[in-house]
Amino acid sequence: MSHLVSASTLSEAWLRTFELVRRAPGGRLTHVVTAVGDPGAEVMGVRDELEKLLAHNGSQSIDTVAETIFPSSLYRDPCIDWHPSIATDSEAVLDDAAASLYESYIGMLPMLRTVGANRSGTYFSRMITWPGKVAGGTNQLELRIARLRSQARAGRRTNNTLDIDLGADALDTDLPISGVQVYAVTDQRTRSFPCLTHIDLTLYEGQLHCTAVYRHQYLVEKAYGNLVGLSALLQFLCQQGGCVPGELVVHATMADAQPATFGGVVDQFVDEALTAVAAASSEV
């Protein structure tokens, strides 16, 4: 049975998803779809409470998880949005900002790959230098941005051929690369990298919508950070590609509330998070 959770902010969408799954038998559900109407919007009280829980358990911070998908700390945002009539010098500023991001991350890649979990590359390295282990690979984000700009110049506001494809066999170098292909069909691991197996980008009436598919979504340790990272990636593509962020959807084929790890302290955490949501709602 599938389950749909929808909210305007990523914080509320994540919290409702977590509440749904943690009450299921064993703290797991299949085919859980989380939809965020305003990607990037957060209730900071919810984030703060989750950070406390993660720190208490010695888990990675939200930003650490988010930066595996989009390293916002390395992006010097020029605060310029691309559009078909943009001035040449402004377009150059945007291009330089993106190029600097790619170069900075690729420069860090040898160090990042010394961490065992990153030995096959990270999500972002595979987006910008496929297959993601060394410099010089295919920059899939650059290609997607070029496609978005070409569509905008042609006056086309709808396009459904912008997928970031994570499903092809990463070991077959003869395959044409149509997207960020990181999940090999020969991979027999039941968990571990990559949990994110596919990203779909759909341009519809000038809005860029994003759907990400996870084969196993750890709701406490990873899911919130994943939403933050995916939101930042979507914002970056829209800024660089001349479109407006649409809905962000995450489909977890297995959603895991991690009761064995966090079950003992989660009730108080949820109460505090719900209080933060109520407080934020009363301020609107």
Image (spheres, helix red, strand yellow):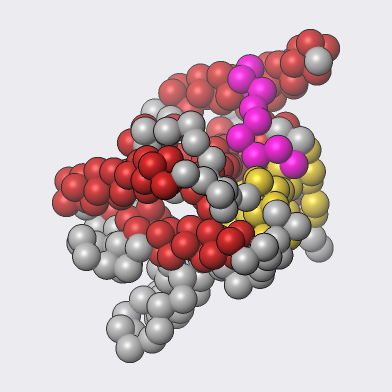
Quarter of the image for residue 253 reads bottom right
Confirm whether residue 82 shows in the render.
yes
Residue 199 percent across, percent down from the top left: 56, 62
Q: Residue furthest bottom?
A: 174
Quadrant, the N terminus: bottom right
Residue 139 percent across, percent down from the top left: 35, 63
User: Residue placed at 33% from the left, 36% from the top?
Assistant: 74
User: Residue placed at 21% from the left, 45% from the top?
Assistant: 108
Number of numbered discs:
0
- Please report the bounds of the magenta region as a residue range: 37-46
Residue 163 percent across, percent down from the top left: 56, 68
User: Residue placed at 76% from the left, 35% from the top?
Assistant: 8
Quarter of the image for residue 158 reads bottom right
Name the magenta segment's main secondary structure: loop
Which one is nearer the viewer's eye here, 138 or 281? 138
Which one is nearer the viewer's eye here, 28 or 220? 220
Relative side of 274 to 199, left or right: right
User: Residue placed at 51% from the left, 46% from the top?
Assistant: 86
Magenta run includes residue 235: no
Which one is nearer the viewer's eye here, 108 or 136? 136
Q: In this view, does 59 lie above or below 177?
A: above
Residue 266 percent across, percent down from the top left: 63, 27
Confirm whether residue 60 shows in the render.
no
Quadrant, the C terminus: top right
